[in-house]
Amino acid sequence: PIPSQLAQVKAFLENQGSEPKRRIDLMLLSAGGNDIQFGTLVTKMATKNISKGEMPAAIVNAMVDRLKSLQGHYTTFSERLAVLNAQYPAGQVILVKYPDPLYRNALENCTGKLDTSSGTFFDLVFGLAKAAGFMQLDEREVVDIRTKVLSPLNKLLDDQVKEHKRDWIVLDPTFTDTEDVREHGWCLGGATTAFESQGRWFRGVGDSRRFQGNMNGSFHPTFAFNEKIQG
């Protein structure tokens, strides 16, 4: 099994040769999107074309259950981080909210058919689905995702810091030093490799299928965007 990230941090700190580090200058946390399976939820909403009716109860219930589970994960993580900090104090902990991939620009949402191409036989299947009116997002669906998935997720992050009086800073990544993330939504120009971002800073369904062989990475930040957040 792969060691937890905190275990990897501890191992790194303990193996610094003759001059081991005694403290952590800055810890950057980004957690929650994978726990609630954000990309999978959005893809299901696009596949089911929920604008024709209310969001399916199964999706709503799954979202509620995953948010409750995420609360427990943060409690466990905080306890383990406290153990690490007792030996290696952290100068500052920054918790990054989940960025919104649903903008075309600051005033317009990303809507339309999803880019699902991956150069495989399954492109035909997805092509037929799109021709039938599925595998796309319209305005109502974008609003549903933003209000029923993204907002509750980011509110949970705020609440975790406030309720547990954690000395963490919550960062909204909507703006980098020089650019507005809302200018780089999922519907803009894509990448040819996993390390490029081009117009968009979020993985499309096709990107995820090409780069990792499934759709789980859909709507997640690209490596290039993560570097901007860290910078």
Image (cartoon, rainbow, N blue to C red):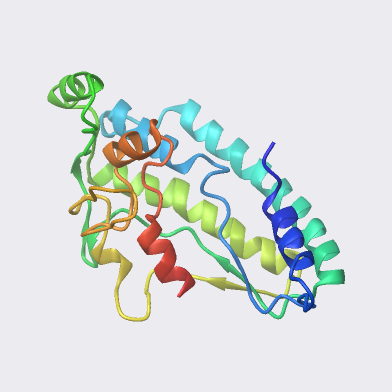
Where, by quadrant of the figure, is residue 209 drawn? top left
Between 108 and 204, the residue placed more toward the observer is 204
Where, by quadrant of the figure, is residue 136 drawn? top left
- Give the side of residue 198 with respect to residue 89, left or right: left
Q: Is residue 43 visible?
A: yes
Residue appearing at x 24%, y 65% in the figure: 183
Q: x and y percent of residue 123 in the render? A: 20, 24
Residue appearing at x 38%, y 69% in the figure: 174
Between 177 and 212, the residue placed more toward the observer is 212
Residue appearing at x 16%, y 19% in the figure: 128
Which quadrant, please, contains the N terminus? Answer: top right
Q: In the image, is residue 104 above or below residue 1?
A: below
Q: x and y percent of residue 204 in the render? A: 29, 43
Residue appearing at x 60%, y 39% in the figure: 66
- Give the side of residue 105 with respect to residue 27, left or right: left
- Give the side of residue 86 with respect to residue 188, left or right: right
Q: In the image, is residue 60 above or below residue 171?
A: above
Which quadrant, please, contains the C terminus? Answer: bottom left
Q: In the image, is residue 90 above or below residue 15?
A: below
Where, by quadrant of the figure, is residue 229 drawn? bottom left
Q: x and y percent of residue 163 in the render? A: 73, 65
Residue found at the very far front of the displayed protein: 18
